Image (cartoon, rainbow, N blue to C red):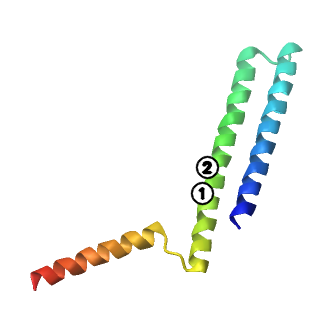
């Protein structure tokens, strides 16, 4: 399963890089034809990058949720599960020391 996720990520990354290069090329053509100013081109490119970052964060969030779901399906303990157990152990140790 891990291999499938890795291949999917690399495929998406390759598509993103190719799209970015094509987009930058198109914007440069528009500047060369005087259809966009340098400032407008910078703004358009920055908006493109910002949207990419937003999508990356969204993808990371979805990936995290999917990983958590798989961990639960396989019966694996998550970091949260382990932290919860540690807290319970500490609480029980404290109660034992009081007795």
Residue 34 visible in the picture: no
Q: Is residue 53 left or right of residue 79?
A: right
Residue at x 61%, y 49% (from the top left corner): 57
Image coordinates of residue 35 in percent, x first then y, are: 86, 18
Residue at x 10%, y 81% (from the top left corner): 98
* For residue 63, above or below residue 81: above
- Mark 2 highlights which residue? 57
Tell me the element at label 2. Answer: helix
- Is mark 2 in CB contact (under 8 Å) with mark 1? yes
Q: Which picture quadrant has residue 32?
A: top right
Residue at x 36%, y 76% (from the top left corner): 85
Residue at x 49%, y 74% (from the top left corner): 77
Image coordinates of residue 47 in percent, x first then y, are: 69, 33
Image coordinates of residue 44 in percent, x first then y, are: 73, 28
User: What distance separates the C-alpha of mark 2 from that of mark 1?
Assistant: 6 Å
Q: Is residue 30 left or right of residue 62?
A: right
Q: Is residue 67 left or right of residue 37?
A: left
Q: Which mark is residue 6?
A: none
Q: Find the residue positioned furthest to the bottom.
A: 99
Q: Find the residue positioned furthest to the front.
A: 3
Q: Nearer the viewer, residue 60 or 74?
A: 74
Q: Which picture quadrant has residue 94?
A: bottom left
* For residue 93, above or below residue 36: below
Disc 1 crowd rating (10 Å Cα; few below 14, some 14-19, many 20+) is few
* For residue 1, above or below residue 95: above
- Mark 1 highlights which residue? 61
């Amino acid at each position: 399963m891990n291999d499938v996720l890795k291949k999917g990520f690399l495929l998406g990354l390759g598509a993103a890089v190719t799209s970015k290069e094509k987009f930058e090329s198109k914007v440069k053509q528009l500047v060369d034809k005087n259809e966009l100013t340098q400032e407008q081109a910078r703004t358009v490119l920055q908006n493109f990058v910002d949207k990419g970052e937003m999508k990356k964060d969204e993808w990371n969030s979805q990936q995290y949720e999917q990983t958590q779901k798989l961990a639960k399906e396989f019966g694996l303990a998550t970091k949260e599960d382990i932290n919860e157990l540690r807290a319970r152990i500490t609480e029980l140790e404290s109660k034992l020391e009081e007795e």
